[in-house]
Amino acid sequence: MLMANVVDKPLTFRAWWYRTGRFGASHAVLALLAATMLVPFLWMVLASFKPLVEVEQLNPFPTRWQPHNYPKVFEQIPFARYYFNSLFVAAWVTFLQCLTSSMAAYAFARLRWRGRDHVFRLYLATLMIPGVVTMIPNYTLMVKLGLLDSYAGLIVPAAFSAFGTFLLRQFMLTIPPSLDEAAAIDGASHWQIFWDVILPLARPGLITLAIFTFLGNYGSFFWPLILIKSEHLRTLPIGMLYFDTMYGRQTNLIMAASVMNIIPLIILFIVSQKFIVKGIQLGAVKG
């Protein structure tokens, strides 16, 4: 059998320059865009160490560094309490959304019952309803249930998510039905199939949903603003709003509080970025 030897022609200098230049130009544009996104964050960090009189100046670096701006925030407002409230509410909402969404997704993806697809479409249609439309009905419901100005009032309305159900349903549709059938032949109940077979395989979707849910509720503003009246129940966004209005425009302290506000989000992203990418990729396998 004859083998044809294929010899690549060496690139000419012009072709090499064109390819290298195009590659370098695209990366330079991406680097510039990334740097542009980092500028506000860097300004916030540097401003948090400045004296108040230097915050509005063009010099990006403080002439006199003031690290005591950070403990001063805790002296002027109960920042630790606000921190706890935001983390507490976001953690509970994340747990409940993952629980309720996974159970609903299992019913829509793995169980066969009459009208399943129609109910799912109706459930999915609620995603088109803006949140501000349901805010007043939810507020009225919280008042009637006696959950106004409470942790439960912040947590319960956010414990269910059509988006979370949709996301996990897409993951569960990628799992082979033969696994359910094999477990059922071995005598497993629907609950055992859900808990021991489907849920472990849908872990990337659960992690993705947990991240999105935590990020969305950690920075929630409008719902806590209209529901919470007591100072000890305020979350970080509401606490920082009152900090800005009650103590005047202390921009350096506000920037210090903002830096501390985003620290959990940065840690969460660093720890879970690979799960975010993997979860999005797996969720797009089947529609």
Image (tube, grey):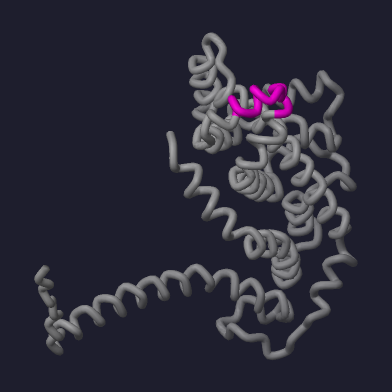
Q: Quadrant of residue 147?
A: top right
Q: Which quadrant: the C terminus?
A: top left
Most distant residue in the top direction: 114
**Percent position (x, y) of residue 168?**
58, 36
The foreground one among 76 and 45 is 45
Drawn side of residue 71 relative to residue 241, left or right: right
The foreground one among 275 and 161 is 275
**Vertical order, 111 against 256 (above or below):** above
**Percent position (x, y) of residue 56?**
61, 76
Q: Which quadrant: the N terminus?
A: bottom left
Q: Quadrant of residue 18?
A: bottom left
Q: Quadrant of residue 79?
A: bottom right
Q: Residue at x 86, y 35 (%)?
A: 150
**Percent position (x, y) of residue 189?**
72, 22
Residue 190 colored in magenta in the image: yes
The foreground one among 12 and 67 is 12
The rendered magenta stretch, by its main secondary structure, is classed as: helix
Q: Residue at x 10, y 73 (%)?
A: 4
Drawn side of residue 100 relative to residue 202, left or right: right
Give the residues in magenta. Answer: 180-192
Q: Residue at x 79, y 51 (%)?
A: 87
Residue 201 colored in magenta in the image: no
**Percent position (x, y) of residue 158?**
70, 34
Most distant residue in the front direction: 1
Q: How many marks?
A: 0
Q: Is residue 15 visible?
A: yes
Q: Residue at x 86, y 72 (%)?
A: 71
Q: Is residue 132 visible?
A: no
